[in-house]
Amino acid sequence: MANNPIPPDQSSWGRGSELAERNRAILRNILEKAAVNDPKRTAVDQKIGDFYGSCMDEQTIEKLGIQPLKPELDRIDAITSKAGILNPLVQLHLLGVGALFRFGSSPDLKDSRHTIADLDQGGEAWDFPTAIIT
C-alpha cells in the first residue's frame, strides 16, 4: 500500500486503472493535437479536432446552459399518458439516447463467431445525448 497508494479521487486502483489512465492521457494528447488550427490538418483531423474543441468550450457551454436540451426536455415534460411516451422515446432513440432500453448488436455469449441482437437496460453514462448539444 505504501508503494502503490490509491489516488485520493479513486475508490480503488490497480494495473488496469493505471493502464486506463495512461490510455486516456494518450487519447487526450491526440485530440488536443487535432484541435490545433493547422492548415496541414487532414479533413478527418479537422473534424475530430473541431468536435473536441466544441466539447471543451466551457464558456459557451456555460453560457448556453440547458437551452440545447430544452426541446427534448419539453417533449418529455409534455407526456401525459402511457401512450404519450412513444413519440418522445422514439425521438430520443433517433438521437442516440438509450432511454429506457438500448438495442444494438453484440457477440453471442455462447458462440462469439456470431453477432446477435442485444437488448439491455438504458441509462448508461455514454447514452448522454451528444447529438442534441453538437
Image (spheres, helix red, strand yellow):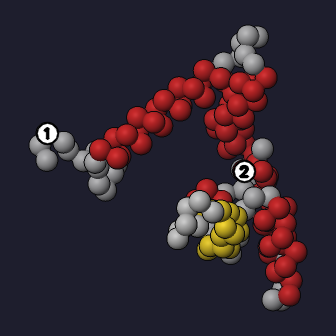
Q: Is residue 46 visible?
A: yes
Q: Residue at x 18, y 42 (%)?
A: 4
Circle 1 is placed at which residue position? 3
Q: Residue at x 63, y 35 (%)?
A: 56
* In the foreground, 128 or 112: 112
| Label 1: element kind | loop
- In the picture, measured across the screen, residue 2 lies left or right of residue 26, that is left
Q: CA distance from mark 1 to mark 2?
A: 40 Å
Q: Residue at x 66, y 24 (%)?
A: 35
Labels 1 and 2 touching (C-beta < 8 A): no
How crowded pointer 1 is (Cα within 10 Å; few <14, some 14-19, many 20+) is rated as few
Q: Quadrant of residue 46?
A: top right
Q: Earlier in the sequence, mark 1 or mark 2?
A: 1
Q: Quadrant of residue 66?
A: bottom right
Circle 2 is placed at which residue position? 130
> Which amino acid type is marked by label 2?
Thr
Q: Which residue sits furthest left?
A: 2
* In the foreground, 15 or 25: 15
